[in-house]
Image: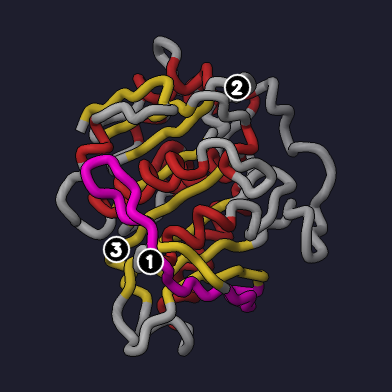
Amino acid sequence: MRGVTLLVIAGLLVTGAAEAAEEAVMLAGMKVTVWSEETPTPRKEPVIIFSHGFHGCATQSRFLMEAFASAGYLVFAPNHRDAACDGGWDLGGPKVAFRRPELWNDTTYRDREEDLRRLIHAIGSDERFGARADLSRLGLSGHSLGGYTVLGSAGAWPSWKLGGVKAVLALSPYSQPFIVHDSLGGLDMPVMYQGGTRDLGITPSLRKNAGAYEKSPRPKYYVEFDKAGHFAWTNLSETAHRLIVAYSLAFMNHYVKGEPVDPILTHTQPGVARLSSDP
């Protein structure tokens, strides 16, 4: 599949043609979509695992996964049990109402954390990906309920914590349970929250006093995109995609790849309504 290389240099995007291959595979008994850069010689690649939203799909945020792959990451996105594509079998309402975050605990959607844990183990031992995947450079990313999943797996639910994760990118994440239970202090890795001015159901809980950003330990970042609603991080919308890619790559490149910090992480670009950082 044709992708686009997006390089962030001093806050500017430079685009050029590159190949980002997409394939559907079975790993750890799950349907998983994999994106990778097409290169003439194999090499060790940092890994990003993406968790989709409630009744979303592994491919829901293809634009961002292709950008990660074109930047040299090996990207894996599993279909969780609640995925509304490819025969997902848990398509009822949420296990616990989203409006009752105080009732959520570390048993709520524990199956999603188990999916990530099994997937990481399977990647390392798989003959197709084991030699390519550099799991010492591992980042987690998730949208909505997937944001809840990766925050919990990064230590917001201590019993979920996955080892070896370098950074977590939470895209309009359902973080209210962690705020109510005051558990975001369990994060011990860099976190970037992303929200939008039209994402009225989630974004206010990220930036409010005693919200997710404030309760998280540093290094931490919060970016809010102008006119972005809840589905801006999916291919259902095109709002703010250029900026979402730019800030996401800058964050992951620094904390997962170990590249020098990009100025965009601490500078507000046109189209960004709010930016907070505490590196």
Q: Residue at 54% x, 39% y: name it.
A: 148
Question: Mark 2, residues whose alpha carbon is within 10 Å: few (<14), some, or many (≥20)?
Answer: some
Residue 137 - label: 3
In-front residue for pair 105/217: 217
Q: Inspect the image, locate mark 2, and give the three-letter code of the amino acid beneath it.
A: Arg
Report how far apart the C-alphas of labels 1 and 2 lie in the structure.
30 Å
User: Which of the image's four quarters has the C terminus?
Assistant: top left
Work out whether 259 lies above or below 206: below
For label 3, the crowd category at 10 Å Cα-Cα, with few meaning under 14, some 14 to 19 and many 20 or more, is many
Q: Which mark is residue 248?
A: none
Give the image quarter of residue 79: bottom right
The amino acid sitting under disc 3 is Arg
Q: Which residue is mark 1?
A: 73
Kind of element beneath mark 3: strand
Image quarter for residue 33?
Answer: bottom right
| Residue 16 position (above or below residue 221) | below
Asked whether 28 falls inside the magenta stretch, the response is yes
Left or right: 43, with 78 as reference point: left
For the record, the magenta segment spans: 6-29
In the displayed orientation, state which residue is furthest to the top: 209
Q: Amino acid at mark 1?
A: Tyr
Q: Quadrant of residue 259?
A: bottom left
How far is disc 3 from disc 1 in space, using C-alphas? 10 Å
Name the residue that disc number 2 marks.
198
10 Å neighbourhood of mark 1: few (<14), some, or many (≥20)?
many
Secondary structure at numbered mark 1:
loop
- Going 69% across and 45% down the picture, which residue do you hit? 236
Between label 1 and label 2, give the one nearer the viewer.
Answer: 2
Label 2's element?
loop
